[in-house]
Structures are given as structure tokens and as C-alpha cells.
Image (spheres, rainbow, N blue to C red):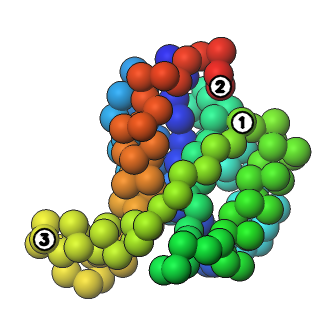
Amino acid sequence: MPRVLALDVGEKRVGVAVTDPLGLTAQPLTVLDRRPHKAFLDKVAGLLKEYQTNFLVLGLPRRTDGRLGPEAQRVMALAYEFRAKLGATVATWEEWLTTVEAERVLKEGGLDARQRRAVVDKTAATLILDGYLARHGSTIKAQDL
């Protein structure tokens, strides 16, 4: 099964997670800068090539009242761009406070604030991918990607 990449999209930074070679588990991978935009797109394209996949899962943030706000609109625009410019298959996964959850997990793991800052975005991406795999993992097939 091809691998899946997940992105936790922030305004400045994007956390990236990837499945293992069998597509069963999610692992934190890296953090990318969003700017300059062309360089960001090139890095995502490079990761898709490196991991031999074209499938991306983007965390879709909702407001506390459940509505989609401007952050979600930016993610949807980015999903469109990944499809159009990179030829990627893109799914969104509704994230609910994944960065807060990632902070909690890392704090419980004994990381200090500086250490947490360095890995929180890719940890949040891992939580997004974990949620997606829990719901869709056994139904994702190569022909879907």
C-alpha cells in the first residue's frame, strides 16, 4: 500500500506526518515553513516523490461552534492547489484542537516548552493522520490513491 502524508497547516509552519511502509501507523516526519509559498509547494512535492505517494490528508480546523472559519478556507484553498499543481489526491480530516492535544501529550512526555515548540506541529500532524487511519485505514487501497 502506498504511504500517506498528513499536514497540520498553520499560518507560518506546517507539521508533516507519514504512514509506515505498510500504511498502518502514523509517524511524525518534519516541519515545513509556509513561506515562501513556492518553496513550500516544492518541499511538499519533494516529500510526495520521496515517499512515493500522491495522497495527502490535510487537517481541517473548525471553530469551537463547529463552523468553518478563515483558517479552514485557507486549508481548502491549499487542498485545491495541491490537486491542481502537484496532481495530488487530497482528503481533509476534521481536526479538533490537535495542536492542544499534541502539547498535552508532549508535556506529559516530559518535554520542556522549548523542546515542545520544536516538535508540536509534526506531532499534531501525526494525530491528524492517526484519526484518519483509524477511520479509513483498512479501506484505503492503492487504486484509491
The Cα–Cα distance between marks 2 and 3, rounded to whole angstroms, is 36 Å
Q: Secondary structure at mark 3?
A: helix
**Do the numbered discs 2 and 3 sit on residues whose CB atoms are within 8 Å?**
no
Say what amino acid the circle numbered 1 marks.
Thr
**Do the numbered discs 2 and 1 sit on residues whose CB atoms are within 8 Å?**
yes
Disc 3 or 1, which lies upstream in sequence? 1
Q: 127 or 32: which is nearer to us?
A: 127
Q: What residue is drawn where x is 41% and y is 72%?
A: 97
List the residue tagged with mark 1. Answer: 89
Checking the image for residue 47, the label placed there is none
Q: Position of residue 81 (x, y in %)?
A: 83, 53
Q: What residue is drawn where x is 37% and y is 54%?
A: 127
Say what amino acid the circle numbered 2 marks.
Leu
Q: What residue is drawn where x is 48% and y is 80%?
A: 64
Q: State which quadrant residue 27 falls in.
A: top left
Q: State which quadrant residue 5 falls in.
A: top right
